[in-house]
Image (tube, rainbow, N blue to C red):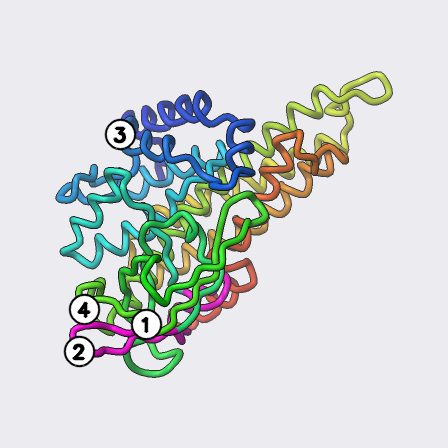
């Protein structure tokens, strides 16, 4: 299987890498992360107007570039390596993907492409839930409107969002595959309450409560009662994209660790000369390469049969989660106490690694999902 990027994809990677190095180095990123806002509007605007990456995978009919999953993988890996906070995954990959699959949403997609919209997607009712059918939030038809009631936990990027996409049950019982619909909701609508907070890695999330929230009938995204299938497709896209981000994070953890052990001296020589340190570095490298292979497979399987697609995504998530913990812990240990300080980049990358290991379900949840999926083969 050929994993080489095309010339255009290679140019995209190099352009984005140079741009981020010049505009969002670790000192700038950390200062922004600790600010009240926590993200940069100028960087988001540059993503849209200078780089065009907000439209990379989105349909040309809405002003996007009509790219594919490899383009997303390339972008996400560089965003991970740079530890970027801006909500590309939530807005472009997840929300943009749902809107594109729904059809007739070019106006909303165009707002993403232009940088005027930032989305958060509230699809699971519990933190890191991957069973998207376990929705208790309800949407009840009332005349020419819907009434939305319920709560969502740990909605990433919600404090920055101009728009929310909310999964709600419109019929059936909790756990039923049918009866789930997606709605576009303005976070400033009366009855919507956000409780925002910092996450471990310096991003923002919120718990959201909906109490008798009135939304227009046109807020429905896609088919009534038939939203689950599209959400499951986009969940696997999100897992693959998050995996690519994790590759960028782990690559930086490994690189910084190699640089450090080559400089740190003990007993008159660099500690990189000690065999036990060399063994650790090799083990970290092997974990990274195995995780890369799993992410490539998941990315290339996104258009496969639904069961094969889901198996590839969950397999990648297990490999990624384990690699993130292993590489992160070893990077910190080889740096000693400095590894957890805010002065070094390594500590910030380790925090992002721990968050990514749990996002969209942890290794145990995906092992359970794999067991269920394998039963259908």
Q: Position of residue 328 (x, y in %)?
A: 63, 41
Q: Secondary structure at mark 1?
A: strand
Q: Which residue is mark 4?
A: 217
Say whether marks 4 and 2 touch (CB < 8 Å).
no
Residues at discs 2 and 1 in contact (Cβ within 8 Å): no
Give the Cα distance between marks 2 and 1. 13 Å
Q: Is 125 a magenta residue?
A: yes
The residue pinned by badge 2 equals 143
* Label annotation for residue 49: 3
x 41%, y 21%: residue:
18
Q: Which mark is residue 148?
A: 1
Task: Choose the circle earlier in sequence order: 1 or 4.
Answer: 1
Q: Residue furthest front?
A: 190
Q: Earlier in the sequence, mark 4 or mark 2?
A: 2
Q: Secondary structure at mark 2?
A: loop
Res 86 → quadrant? top left
Q: Which of disc 1 and disc 3 is earlier in sequence?
A: 3
């Amino acid at each position: 299987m050929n994993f080489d990027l095309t010339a255009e994809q290679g140019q995209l990677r190099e352009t984005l890498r140079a741009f981020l190095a010049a505009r969002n180095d670790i000192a700038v990123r950390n200062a922004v992360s600790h600010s009240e806002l926590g993200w940069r509007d100028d960087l988001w605007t540059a993503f849209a107007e200078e780089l065009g990456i907000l439209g990379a995978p989105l349909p040309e009919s809405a002003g996007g570039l009509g790219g594919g999953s490899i383009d997303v993988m390339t972008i996400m890996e560089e965003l991970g390596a740079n530890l970027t906070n801006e909500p590309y995954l939530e807005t472009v990959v997840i929300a943009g993907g749902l809107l594109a699959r729904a059809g007739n949403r070019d106006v909303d997609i165009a707002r993403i492409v232009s940088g005027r919209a930032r989305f958060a997607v509230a699809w699971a009712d519990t933190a890191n839930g991957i069973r998207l059918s376990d929705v208790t939030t309800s949407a009840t038809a009332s005349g020419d409107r819907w009434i939305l009631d319920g709560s969502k936990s740990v909605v990433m990027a919600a404090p920055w969002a101009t728009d929310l996409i909310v999964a709600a049950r419109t019929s059936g019982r909790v756990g039923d595959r049918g009866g789930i619909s997606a709605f576009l909701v303005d976070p400033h609508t009366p009855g919507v309450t956000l409780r925002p907070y910092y996450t471990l890695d310096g991003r923002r999330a919120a718990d959201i409560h909906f109490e008798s929230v009135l939304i227009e009938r046109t807020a429905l995204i896609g088919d009534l009662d038939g939203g689950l299938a599209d959400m499951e497709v986009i969940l696997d896209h999100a897992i693959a994209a998050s995996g690519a981000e994790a590759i960028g994070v782990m690559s930086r953890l490994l690189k910084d660790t190699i640089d450090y052990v080559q400089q740190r001296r003990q007993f008159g020589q660099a500690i990189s000369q000690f065999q036990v340190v060399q063994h650790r570095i090799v083990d970290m490298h092997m974990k990274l390469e195995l995780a890369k292979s799993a992410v490539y497979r998941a990315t290339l399987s996104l258009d496969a049969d639904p069961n094969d697609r889901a198996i590839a995504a969950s397999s990648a998530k297990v490999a990624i989660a384990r690699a993130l913990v292993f590489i992160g812990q070893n990077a910190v240990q080889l740096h000693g106490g400095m590894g957890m300080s805010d002065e070094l980049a390594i500590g910030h990358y380790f925090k992002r690694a721990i968050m990514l290991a749990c996002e969209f379900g942890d290794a145990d949840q995906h092992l359970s999902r794999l067991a269920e999926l394998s039963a259908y083969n």
